[in-house]
Amino acid sequence: MDLGETDIDPSDPKHRAMLKNLQGNILKPHGREESDHLFLRFTGDRGAVRAWIRTFARYEVTSAREQVDAAKSFRSSGIPGAMFVGLALSATGYAALGVGTAEFGASFRNGMKHRAFSLISRNRDPPSSEWEAPFQGAIDALIVLADDSADDVEAKTQQICKDLEGIARVLTVEKGTVLRNAKGEPVEHFGYVDGRSQPLFLKSDIDRERAEGVARWDPSAPLGLVLVDDPHTDAEDAFGSYLVFRKLRQDVA
């Protein structure tokens, strides 16, 4: 796979392996109204944690292929897809699995608690000892659950918490709900339409944006903007991405 490519057509057979191996919510947002974010610290032995991740990835995590197919079905039938499920590991999470992170760079290994991290320094964040209690210590993994039904998300969260007994401790659950304006457009807290001027990678998304009238910029972006090769597998076209979860308070008034 050439990471310099853009305008990706999911129906092209050459992209089959990449989309199957890649998690969703990277090349396009999951688009669900409600979400739970489960922050974990592994407590089980290495073998048990590895086995849980293997099963969870195979049967629960939503692939980019599944996400693309669900979006296509929704546009044609109006029927929403299944719940989106994602899994992210931190550097300490990789360490718990006995997997090295040297290839991922110092910023990933250090994490946001490191005072030299540019975002922390630039925004004059307080030291991590003053953060909310669940975030002060090590966080090994993040599970993202998203659906249009808050009840379904809550039920899935409870199921996963039960399944994780003996494997991991759920440190906290951060809930999210999409805000919308009078037109039904998703907005951030200050009222600005969210998701505008974002880089696009899939042909259908790029074509839709151009059809709405793009005169000042090209929304297409190369895959290499968000994808990196997974150094821990020999599988063909296996990529991942970096994720930052940052919690902050905005003084809207």
Image (cartoon, grey):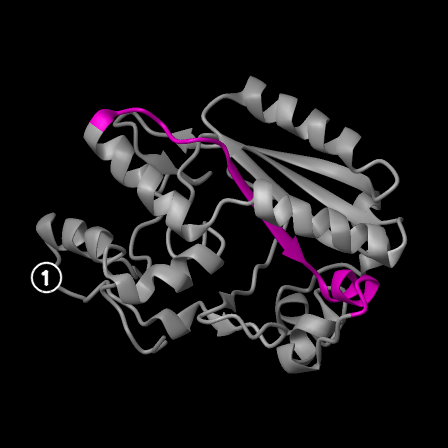
Badge 1 marks a residue whose secondary structure is loop
Q: Which stretch appears magenta?
A: 77-98
Residue 250's spot in the image, x, y percent?
A: 57, 44
- Between 194 and 14, the one lying in front of the other is 14
Q: Is residue 46 left or right of residue 245?
A: right
| Rendered residue at 21%/58% (across/down) | 203
Q: Quadrant of the N terminus?
A: bottom left
The answer to whether residue 115 is left or right of residue 88 is right
Magenta-span inclusion, residue 103: no
At x 33%, y 46%, the residue is 68
Q: Judge the density around disc 1: few (<14), some (14-19), many (≥20) Cα neighbours within 10 Å.
A: few
252 over 89 or under it: above or below: above
Say if the magenta span includes residue 92: yes
Residue drawn at point x = 48 percent, y = 29 percent: 147
Height in image: 33 above or below 170?
A: above
Q: Residue at x 56, y 72 (%)?
A: 230
Q: Tell me if I can see residue 119 in this picture.
A: yes
> Residue 207 in the image: x percent, y percent?
15, 54
Residues 96 and 209: in front is: 96
Instruction: Please say whether residue 136 is visible from this viewpoint.
Output: no
Where 139 falls versus 133 (above or below)? below
Q: Which residue is mark 1?
A: 215
**Type of residue at label 1?**
Ala
